[in-house]
Amino acid sequence: MSTYKISKSFRWRGKLTDKVMQVCRMFGLTADRLTQRRIINNCRLEINDGDIVYITGPSGAGKSVLLKELEKAIPTSERVNLARIKLPRDKTLIDCIDADLLTSLRMLSDAGLNDVFCILNQPANLSEGQKYRFRLAMAMAAKKKFIFADEFCSELDRITAVVISYNIHKFAKRTGTTFILASSHEDLMLDLAPDVLVIKELSEKAQVIYKNKKF
């Protein structure tokens, strides 16, 4: 079990133009109050190996900020982020997975890629949803301790997203891989079954709920 304390703040640094001052007057806001205001994102998390951490809340609440700051706390050698996985043009999906055939097929299937014509295609030629699932398969095949994914399954139809969530839960428990996921969708909760739920509302505090607190 490891403890992570995340804190990130932002100050308003815009220019006090005529329009800005007019808006301030409309809402009874002084220039001093505007320039001194700080948006604070902080959180304290207790995470075990194989946990699924799900950061959720409305758009603009700071989910991505918490995810990025938590990612910085993990050594580069121990983490992978879906957003930074490249899409090869010179290999088929099955050849991109560095494992034997059956393991490669299982990785792709866990990520929702089980159509033969898709498996024998090049990643760069896939649809946006398929590209996302390919990156997920590559992340799982990378054998890193932590997998980070912002906007988790947001581009996918909800049935596919639910199936992948269920598969990820099984993969995390089977391999001890920790998933740090962020999304505004709440329809994945049942199948994803997160161990740590972080609810980030439009305020500076985040609510952290543990499924089984044993520490």
Image (cartoon, helix red, strand yellow):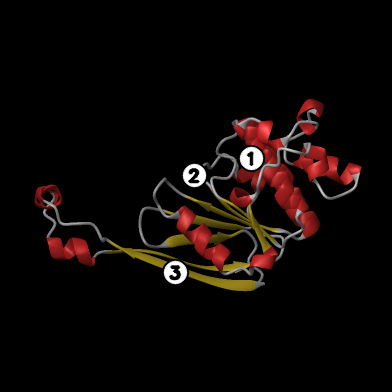
Foreground pick, 192 / 24:
24
Foreground pick, 175 / 84:
84
**Cα–Cα span, label 3 and label 2:** 21 Å
213 displayed left or right of 168 = left
Q: Which mark is residue 132?
A: 1
Q: Is residue 197 visible?
A: yes
10 Å crowding of disc 1: few (<14), some (14-19), many (20+): many
Badge 3 element: strand
Badge 2 element: loop
Say which quarter of the image contains residue 50: bottom right
Foreground pick, 4 / 89:
89
Across and down, in percent, residue 209 comes to 54, 60
- For marks 1 and 3, the one nearer the N-term is 3
Across and down, in percent, residue 208 comes to 51, 61
- For marks 1 and 2, the one nearer the N-term is 1
Badge 1 element: helix
Across and down, in percent, residue 86 comes to 65, 46
33 displayed left or right of 214 = left
Question: What is the three-letter code of the residue carrying label 3?
Answer: Ser
Residue at label 2?
184
Quarter of the image where the N terminus is located: bottom right
Question: What is the three-letter code of the residue carrying label 1?
Answer: Tyr
Q: Which residue sits at x=75%, y=35%?
A: 113
Across and down, in percent, residue 119 comes to 79, 33
Q: Which mark is residue 7?
A: 3
**Cα–Cα span, label 1 and label 2:** 17 Å
Q: Which residue sits at x=63%, y=30%?
A: 127
Question: What is the three-letter code of the residue carrying label 2?
Answer: Ser
